[in-house]
Image (cartoon, helix red, strand yellow):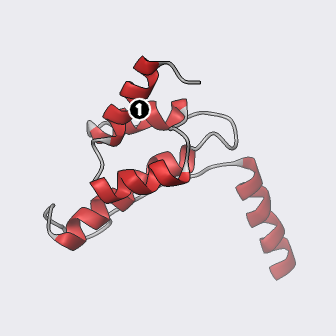
């Protein structure tokens, strides 16, 4: 069981998202992981953010939930949209690197 303060902190970080996005997250997951909670705070403050955490800790969702939120807000008119790239994520991992190498090897 989570401590009350931890639940309040998690509610605070989720309250920064559009209600539909926050509700989806709450219905899909019990709570944000520490990398998500810390990552979201940094990303939502507009800081360049590097999340270094073990596989399966929610790093990808930490990055993309913010992107999904921004895209939703632009779609419904809550946030002005711009032109160009809306979301850029660099995922450098050994498995991705190995997959690209293997795919390149078989393509030759």
Answer whether residue 48 is visible to the viewer in this image: no
Q: In the rendered picture of this protein, how many numbered marks are placed on residues?
A: 1
For residue 106, which quarter of the picture? bottom right
- How far across and how far down the image is residue 15, in percent? 29, 41
- How far across and how far down the image is residue 83, in percent? 21, 71
Is residue 106 depicted above or below 78 in this figure? Answer: below
Depth check, front residue: 26 or 87? 26
Residue drawn at (36%, 56%) of the image: 21
Position of the N terminus, as image quadrant, is top right
Identify the residue position indicated by label 1 in the image: 10
Mark 1 lies on a secondary structure that is helix
Depth check, front residue: 107 or 82? 82
- How far across and how far down the image is residue 43, in percent? 35, 40
Instruction: Say whether residue 45 is left or right of residue 107.
Output: left
Position of the C terminus, as image quadrant, is bottom right
Is residue 90 depicted above or below 4 in this figure? Answer: below
Depth check, front residue: 69 or 84? 69
Residue drawn at (43%, 57%) of the image: 24
Q: Residues within 10 Å of mark 1 (few under 14, many from 20)?
A: some
Residue drawn at (46%, 48%) of the image: 26
Residue drawn at (53%, 30%) of the image: 34
């Amino acid at each position: 069981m989570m401590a009350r303060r931890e639940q309040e902190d998690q509610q605070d970080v989720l309250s920064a998202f559009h209600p539909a996005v926050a509700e989806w997250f709450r219905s899909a997951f019990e709570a944000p992981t520490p990398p998500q909670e810390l990552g979201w705070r940094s990303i939502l403050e507009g800081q360049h953010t590097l999340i270094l955490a073990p596989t399966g800790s929610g790093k990808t969702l930490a990055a993309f939930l913010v992107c999904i939120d921004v895209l939703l807000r632009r779609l419904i008119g809550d946030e002005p949209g711009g032109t160009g790239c809306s979301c850029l994520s660099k995922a450098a991992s050994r498995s991705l690197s190995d997959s690209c190498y293997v795919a390149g090897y078989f393509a030759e």
